[in-house]
Image (cartoon, rainbow, N blue to C red):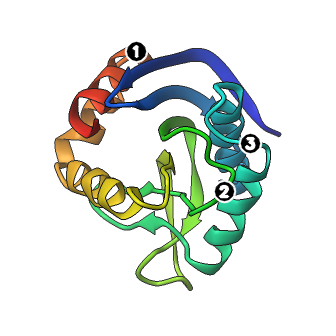
Amino acid sequence: MVTQSVDTAECEAGGKLFVALKGSASTSEEAIRICANTLQANGCVTEKFADDCLNREKEYPTGICCETPVALPHCQSDAIRRDALCYLRLDEPVSFYRMDDPEDAVMTRHVFNLAIAPGQHLEFLTKTIRLLQDNTVLDRFTTMTSNQIASYLAEHLA
């Protein structure tokens, strides 16, 4: 069952929309759909985006095994209308298959769904991964409000 709390915040910077929300999902697919639906509601992507991300996730998983595991679902898609990032902090962790070992999975509460145009996609993904290499960032995200997280992401990734 896909649920989403009302703690949602948005911040715009550098022509990109940064959205942060809290929610619950029982699978990685549900988590991706929550993010994609939020981006669609903000006019950043079309309905096709969720399926494009899920199809890419099946071929090339995005779970990252680190001190605090994360997932970075993304895709290159014509469904992207406006560059955006949706961060979802889950109430309970869900399983994402690992980027470096697709046979294994990580349990994560932190999902960063990227909707970035193909020309800037790799650069933005690299910038996001670099930010997340600071182990204190995700620790802070567990206590910050969605508004604070959206502002933080905009400040550091725009």
- Look at 37% across and 67% down and name the residue there: 65
| Residue 91: x %, y % from top left | 56, 34
**Is residue 143 among the parts visible in the rendering?**
no
Q: Is residue 64 above or below residue 153?
A: below
User: Which residue position is annotated with label 2?
Assistant: 78
Residue occupying the far right of the picture: 1
Callout 2: 10 Å neighbours few (<14), some, many (20+)? few
- Secondary element under disc 2, as helix, strand or loop, is loop
Which amino acid type is shown beneath numbered disc 2? Asp
First in residue order: circle 3 vs circle 2: 3
Disc 3 secondary structure class: loop
Q: Quadrant of residue 43?
A: top right
User: What is the spatial separation of the Cα atoms under label 3 and label 2, in whole angstroms?
Assistant: 9 Å
The CA distance from mark 1 to mark 3 is 24 Å
What's under tag 1, amino acid-wise?
Asn
* Residue 108 locus on image (x, y percent): 48, 52
Alpha carbons under labels 1 and 2: distance apart: 29 Å
Residue 62: percent from left, percent from top: 49, 67
Disc 1: which residue: 147
